[in-house]
């Protein structure tokens, strides 16, 4: 068994491996695969199957690629889109979770998201990140 892992390690040496982009492509492929179970017409089913197989193949090709510079560049481009989306989803989730006790406000100076106690009226808020103060209304 140990020998098997050593062989894999040796095989993966100098190859790119997994990153956030590959992870997302794999999840997307899994989602398409799951949805496709419920799609019965032949042609759409076939098209989705090809898309899913194509995504899986792309992940394998990227993971085994020796062109690490190019693959990292692709991942960075992907992260530029993915990060804001992820942050927005996280913030929206927090807003919903804390909606009874807190409101979220953006600091006008450093753009940090601040949690303000949900008390009606005007508040003076001090940003813990940059120290600037500003007024906000709830
Ligand atoms: Zn600030």
Image (spheres, rainbow, N blue to C red):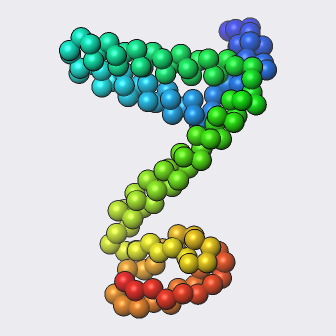
Nearer to us in this view, 119 or 33: 33
Q: Is residue 30 left or right of residue 69?
A: left
Q: Position of residue 32 (x, y in %)?
A: 36, 25
Residue 55 against residue 6 in the figure, above or below: below
Count of marks, rendered view: 0
Q: In this view, which residue lies farthest toward the left?
A: 41
Residue shown at 44%/30% (left/top)?
A: 28
Nearer to us in this view, 117 or 1: 117
Q: Position of residue 63 (x, y in %)?
A: 64, 22
Residue shown at 40%/86% (left/top)?
A: 137
- The quarter in which the N terminus is drawn is top right
Residue 58 against residue 75 in the figure, above or below: above
Residue shown at 57%/22% (left/top)?
A: 59
Quadrant housing residue 68 = top right
- The quarter in which the C terminus is drawn is bottom left
Q: Can residue 101 be seen?
A: yes
Residue 121 against residue 80 in the figure, above or below: below
Q: Position of residue 97 (x, y in %)?
A: 36, 62
Q: Can residue 9 be seen?
A: no
Q: Position of residue 39 (x, y in %)?
A: 23, 20
Q: Is residue 26 left or right of residue 18?
A: left
Quadrant housing residue 29 = top left
Residue shown at 46%/78% (left/top)?
A: 116
Residue 56 against residue 106 in the figure, above or below: above
């Amino acid at each position: 068994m140990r020998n098997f892992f050593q062989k894999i390690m040796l095989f993966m040496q100098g190859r790119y491996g997994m990153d956030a982009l590959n992870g997302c492509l794999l999840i997307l492929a899994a989602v398409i695969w799951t949805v496709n179970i419920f799609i019965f017409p032949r042609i759409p089913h076939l098209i989705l199957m090809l898309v899913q197989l194509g995504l899986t193949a792309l992940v394998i090709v990227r993971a085994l690629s020796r062109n690490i510079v190019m693959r990292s560049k692709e991942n960075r481009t992907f992260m530029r889109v993915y990060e804001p989306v992820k942050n927005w989803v996280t913030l929206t989730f927090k807003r919903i979770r804390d909606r009874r006790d807190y409101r979220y406000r953006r600091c006008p100076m450093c753009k940090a998201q601040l949690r303000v106690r949900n008390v009606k009226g005007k508040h003076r808020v001090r940003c813990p990140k940059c120290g600037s103060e500003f007024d906000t209304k709830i």
